[in-house]
Image (tube, rainbow, N blue to C red):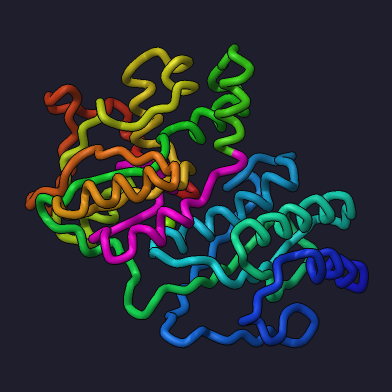
């Protein structure tokens, strides 16, 4: 395993360095210090080739996605990122692959101010497991369980782009406009974790989740944990110009927006008195946000409307289910 140990050299240097890391990569374990008044939020996610990303995806995109999905989970809790641990399983040693992968992680560490504090590299099928830890001021976490009837339902960014991007890559959809096609593929490869939106939602949002499995499926998580229901106005779903102009059939466009996963936008609820505040605060950071519906007392029920009329998707497929 000596050659695999060498790979560690790529990760030990070049990344962002934090003062709260007393001992980083290089010893048996890392030592970190939690600032006074902060709680640690921990999440972990595994990406496996062929399940979570296509074979032959560029190392930069795999690194980006592995980090982004974890930071997105922290963002959904209102946490800011601090420390990352990486476990990398590689079929063989390809130094240029490892170099590109590690450089992407380092550049993200500088952008999001996290430090890579440890990891492990083994030989096996290509898979990446990342554990991300972040901070929230004591007891300010945003959970899935606090939504109340009459709260507004909002979402950041646009929905459905990553799903179309994946379908372009797998030849299920043809988008002839090169600029749009490239935008949609990049939304699949390089999702933006909504870290700043997450911290802005602290003490304001009553619930939050990141849209990883598809809007409807993720909304189900919120309403079942909160024991409420929701009305979703499908005509209000934020759809990018690239999606809207190239997926001309309205039902197809709505299916992407409501059921395709991997957009990593934040879906959250706010009480009436906080709605203008949060819309203004997010706008001041140039984070698009759209109100798409409202929480109801009809526990467990999602009431889909299109132009005020009840609407049902023909497809039984609501969101991406792992191993399905
Ligand atoms: Mg999540």
The segment highlighted magenta reads 189-216
Residue at (41% x, 61% y) in the render: 199
**Figure check: 308 above or below 6:** above
Residue 199 is covered by the magenta coloring: yes
Q: Residue 205 falls in which quadrant of the image? A: bottom left
Q: Residue 190 falls in which quadrant of the image? A: top right
Give residue 131's position: percent from left, percent from top: 58, 69
Q: Is residue 115 left or right of residue 279?
A: right
Q: How many numbered marks, from 0 up?
A: 0
Give residue 264's position: percent from left, percent from top: 46, 47
Query: Which residue is nearer to you in this view: 48 or 214?
Result: 214
Residue 42 is covered by the magenta coloring: no
Give residue 240's position: percent from left, percent from top: 44, 27
Query: Which quadrant contains ligand 1?
Result: bottom left
Residue at (43% x, 80% y) in the render: 39
Give residue 267's position: percent from left, percent from top: 33, 48
Q: Is residue 105 left or right of residue 162?
A: right
Instruction: Farthest residue to the left: give it.
Output: 297
**Figure check: 47 above or below 169:** below
Query: Which residue is nearer to you in this view: 132 or 318?
Result: 132
Residue at (60% x, 72% y) in the render: 83
Residue at (72% x, 46% y) in the render: 60
Q: Quadrant of the N terminus?
A: bottom right
**Figure check: 246 above or below 218:** above
Q: Is residue 177 left or right of residue 315?
A: right
């Amino acid at each position: 395993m000596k050659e695999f140990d060498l790979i560690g050299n790529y990760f030990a240097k070049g990344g962002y360095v934090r003062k709260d890391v007393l001992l980083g990569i290089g010893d048996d374990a890392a030592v970190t210090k939690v600032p006074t008044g902060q709680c640690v939020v921990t999440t972990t996610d595994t990406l496996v080739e062929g399940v979570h990303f296509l074979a032959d995806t560029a190392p930069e995109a795999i690194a980006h996605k592995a980090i982004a999905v974890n930071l997105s989970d922290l963002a959904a809790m209102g946490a800011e990122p601090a420390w990352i641990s990486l476990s990398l399983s590689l079929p063989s040693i390809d130094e240029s692959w490892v170099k590109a992968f590690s450089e992407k992680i380092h550049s993200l560490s500088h952008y999001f101010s996290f430090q890579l504090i440890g990891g492990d590299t083994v030989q096996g099928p290509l898979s990446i497991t990342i554990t991300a830890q972040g901070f929230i001021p004591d007891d300010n976490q945003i959970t899935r369980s606090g939504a109340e009837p009459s709260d507004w339902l909002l979402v950041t960014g646009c929905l459905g782009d990553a799903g179309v991007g994946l379908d372009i890559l797998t030849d299920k959809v043809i988008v002839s406009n090169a600029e749009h096609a490239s935008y949609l593929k990049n939304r699949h490869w390089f999702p933006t974790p909504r870290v700043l939106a997450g911290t802005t939602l602290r003490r304001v949002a009553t619930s939050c989740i990141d849209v990883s499995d598809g809007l409807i499926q993720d909304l189900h998580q919120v309403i079942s944990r909160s024991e409420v229901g929701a009305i979703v106005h499908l005509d209000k779903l934020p759809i990018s110009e690239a999606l809207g102009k190239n997926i001309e059939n309205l039902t197809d466009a709505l299916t992407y927006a409501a059921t395709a996963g991997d957009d990593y936008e934040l879906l959250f609820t706010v009480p009436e008195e906080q709605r203008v505040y949060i819309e203004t605060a997010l706008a001041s950071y140039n984070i698009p946000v759209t109100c798409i519906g409202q929480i109801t007392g009809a526990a467990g029920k999602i009431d889909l409307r299109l132009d005020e009329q009840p609407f049902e998707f023909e497809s039984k497929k609501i969101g991406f289910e792992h191993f399905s």
